[in-house]
Amino acid sequence: MLTFNDLIVAFETLGLQNKPVIAHASLHSFGRVEGGADSVITSLMYTTGAFIMPTHTYKTMVTPASGPANNAVNYTRGQQWNRLSEPYRPDMPADRMMGVIPDSIRHWPEAARSMHPILSFSGIRADKILKSQTIEEPFAPLRALVEQDGWVMLIGVDHTVNTSIHFAEKLAGRKQFVRWALTESGTVTCPGFPGCSAGFQVIEPEVRSFTKSVKVGEATVLALPLRALMIRVIELIKKDRYALLCDRSDCERCGEVRKM
Ligand SMILES: [Zn+2]
C-alpha cells in the first residue's frame, strides 16, 4: 500500500513547488493509497504552489425548446431529460466521472470553488485563479494559469481528460458551443462550451519532449508546462483543422467542428 510519504517524494521530483497547477487524477490508478483521496490532496498541497481541479456538474444541464443551429444539440430529444436536471448549488458534489479526488477538495477549509454552474473548478491557494471565471469565459482560470507559468499534472490519467487542451482549441479559433444550466435563479445560458476530448491522446508524442514523468505505485504521473502545451495544440490545429477530433462517426460535437 502506498503512503502519503511515497506520494510526496514522487510529486516533489516534478519540481512544481512554486508553480500553480491544474491537476487531473484517478485515485484508482495508484493501487491502494493509505488515506485515499485526502492523502493525494495533502500531497498536492505540499508539492505545488497552488492547485485547481475540475469539479464540473453536468447534472445541472437543461435543453431549451429551441436554440442556435449547428450546436450539437437535438432540442426536441434533449428536452425529455430536463426532468432529471438539478439546480446548481455551490456545495453540489462534482460529477462522479470527475473522480473522488476533486470532490474531496471541497471539504478542505481553505478550498474555494469557481462560479460556473456546469464547468466549475475547485482549488487550494488558488482563489485569484478561480475568481477569474465568468459565464462568458469558463476557461479563464486556465488563462490565469498560463499567465502565471502554470503546469498541468495528469495523475494516472491521459490527455483525454486534459481540460487545458480545450482552452487551446478555443485560442486556435475552434468552434465553441452553447449550453444551458439550471440554477436557483432560473436557467442560465452558458456560451464557450467546449467540444469533445475523446481524440486528445494523439497529442502525447507531440508534447513528450517537454513532459516530465514519475512512477508512483501503479500510476504514472505526468507534468507539462501549460504555455508549451498551448503553443503545440494551436500549431497542430493551424496545420490540420481536424486535429484532435475523435473517430466516432456519431460524435455530434466533432461532427459540427468538421462541418465548419
Ligand atoms: Zn468527438
Image (tube, rainbow, N blue to C red):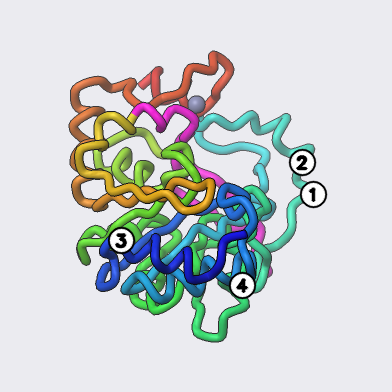
Can you say whether 63 is above or below 71 in the image? Answer: below
Choose the circle earlier in sequence order: 4 or 3: 3
Give the distance between the C-alpha atoms of the residues marked 2 and 1, in whole angstroms: 6 Å
Q: Identify the mark at residue 13; answer none if there is no mark.
A: 3
Q: Is residue 180 magenta?
A: yes
The residue labelled by disc 1 is 84
Q: Is residue 194 magenta?
A: yes
Choose the circle earlier in sequence order: 4 or 2: 2
Q: Are marks 2 and 1 in contact (CB under 8 Å)?
A: yes
Which is nearer the eye, 108 or 81?
108
Q: Residue at x 65, y 64 (%)?
A: 88
Q: Mark 1 or mark 4: which is in front?
A: 4
Q: Is residue 144 visible?
A: no
Q: Identify the mark at residue 90; answer none if there is no mark.
A: 4
Q: Residue furthest bottom?
A: 109
Which is nearer the eye, 232 or 155?
155
Choose the circle earlier in sequence order: 3 or 2: 3
Q: Can you tell which quarter of the image residue 117 is in? A: bottom right
Give the distance between the C-alpha atoms of the residues marked 4 and 2, in whole angstroms: 22 Å
The magenta stretch spans which residues? 177-202
Q: Residue at x 45, y 49 (%)?
A: 191
- Residue type of the residue flagged with mark 4: Pro
- Residue type of the residue flagged with mark 1: Leu
Choose the circle earlier in sequence order: 3 or 1: 3
Report crowding for label 2: few under 14, some 14 to 19, many 20 or more residues within 10 A (C-alpha). few
Please tell me whether mark 1 sits on a helix, a strand or a loop: helix
Can you say whether 252 is above or below 2 in the image? Answer: above
Q: Is residue 114 left or right of residue 225?
A: right
The residue labelled by disc 2 is 81
